[in-house]
Image (cartoon, rainbow, N blue to C red):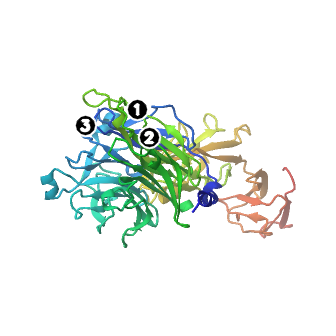
Amino acid sequence: MTGYVLGVALLLAGGTSLCAQSSNRIWFAIYNGAPTPSSDVSVRTVMSDGSASVPAAGLAGNFVSQTNFSSFHSPYDVAVDPAMGKVYVLDNNLQGEAPEYIYSFNLAGTPAQIAASGQIIYSMPVPAADVNAHLYPLISGLALDPVRHLLYFCQMDVTTSTNSYVGQLDLASSSKSDIDSSDGGDPAFQPYYTGQIPGQGAIALDESNLYLGAINGRAGNTGVFAAPRDGNGAFSEIVTLSAGDTSFPNGLVGGVASDPQDHLIYYLTFNAGYVNRNFDTGQNALWAYDTASRQTEKISSGYPGFPDAIAVDPANRRYYFTVGRDGTGNASPTNFQAIYTGNLGSTNAPTLFYTPALSGEDGNGQPNAGNVALQGIFVKDPPVLALLPATVIYAEGGAPAILAPDLVADDPGSSLLAGATVAIVGGGFAGDDDLLSAVTNGTRIRAGYDTTTETLTLSGSDTLADYQQVLRTVAFSSANPDPTQGGASPSRAIAWTVTDGALSSATATVKLALLPMPPQNEMGIARAMGGWTLVFTGIPGRNYVFQFTDAVTGPWNDLSPILTAAPSGLVEYDDSTMPSPPIRFYRVRSAP
């Protein structure tokens, strides 16, 4: 296999894909590898515009840190479920002398409130043999299913194999993680895969499989393994990393991530040697494995720190991975800690994205920057809102106009939304008596309209489907007998956003055209929505028969007077109850 062959395959698979770039939020963990924790123990966040742009070094906010939550040993991985309103943090005790936990924190609130919300939702069971030996099982990876709200983790017993498994926590089953309550018990636990797992390591999910980056070098099975997503099948090795190779005796897979669109598995490797001491930096690398061609390509290598964790951002077609700890054995602390980013489906080397500001001291005030590690990374994109059509019509005094009957709401990282706003942001005037309304029946969504700001607010955590259903019912009406202000205000601009609790969508806008209602049995004509709109005022109760239905849509009734016609369509209607002549013709040629 040559690099050229896979490089072409990668570029063909994903290099030409187009997507709308959007801002995202990135969570990552920092811990101090020395025995004594320091103020660098934290979970931080940084915003990205979805490109390869580089934030200034150190510009990240602490989500939660050692200074306000003192129980951390080594925050090792991070997962975020905005719909549940939670951030989940794996606390891995590197010293192997204390149990390990999974914590949950509220996503929103002040720093003090977030810290106070921290609670253990899962504690590793410890076999008696481990207790006696003062060795504890290790949790090494978290993987979140944001649609089913399941959290997977890998646990390995360091002394026996009986306590090694891939576990699954049902986040939605517990009121500790539930969207409506902060009381109750831990999430329901069940073993996801209880057979002999290949070793401790990072895990990732896609719709088909669960992937494990094994780092159990002692068993000679370092590599990337896959098991069926439904749990009905054993792990099989898809990538072998120098099993039994004496030049790579302590090779580890530090992170793994799936990109189904390009049928690629990304993974990170490093040769630990003796942890934090000299090793071959050429084996510290980012790789891509093509599941279709079964070929592997090294994308980049030579990192002086340990490549630890990787996450993909499908919406922006990017990946992000962390490099932490100085592995050169340099006695002088040197910060190699960083986050790199690159394009999914490309073999181009990644670029430096972020370097944190570190105190570089342990709990005793001694220099320790070289032992501080970045570990665990999670990327969350905002929800997406698409509105069609771009312009709608409201006839003065008529029925409320539905603004976005074909609206589409989606979220690449959640199955729930937390809220939405629809606001009149242009074209109105004081005393216009405009009103926005929505039908929320059968959902958990609450609706409220502020007449001062002319904003309709939808709130309450509910499914994407329910939010889409309610947003499709949002309607405009006006109690003002002259909502166009004598023609001075013939339109309105309506702005829409949705939020999943962590991020909000880009604002989408609908233009609303206000048309005066013509006299009875007359038509008003205006150009809109790429064609011609006809407002026809008939007499309630009469039967109007429209001909040439290929040119006219929207059968008239006394509650919905708006029709549309092709730019040069002939409009003909017949009212059998009218005096002779009973047929009138309208030909739409140009501007009315």
Contact, CB < 8 Å: mark 1 with mark 2?
Answer: yes
- Amino acid residing under circle 3: Ser
> Label 3: few (<14), some or many (≥20) within 10 Å?
few
- Amino acid residing under circle 1: Thr
- Amino acid residing under circle 2: Pro
Q: Nearer the viewer, residue 345 or 424?
A: 345
> Residue tagged by mark 3?
70
Dot 3: element: loop
Which of the 4 image quarters holds residue 405?
Answer: bottom right
Q: Which of labels 1 and 3 is toward the front?
A: 1
Q: Position of residue 462 (x, y in %)?
A: 43, 55
Question: Is residue 405 in view?
Answer: no
- Indicate left or right for 587 with 389 as reference: right
- Indicate left or right for 63 with 387 as reference: left
Residue projecting furthest to the front? 246
> Residue tagged by mark 2?
304
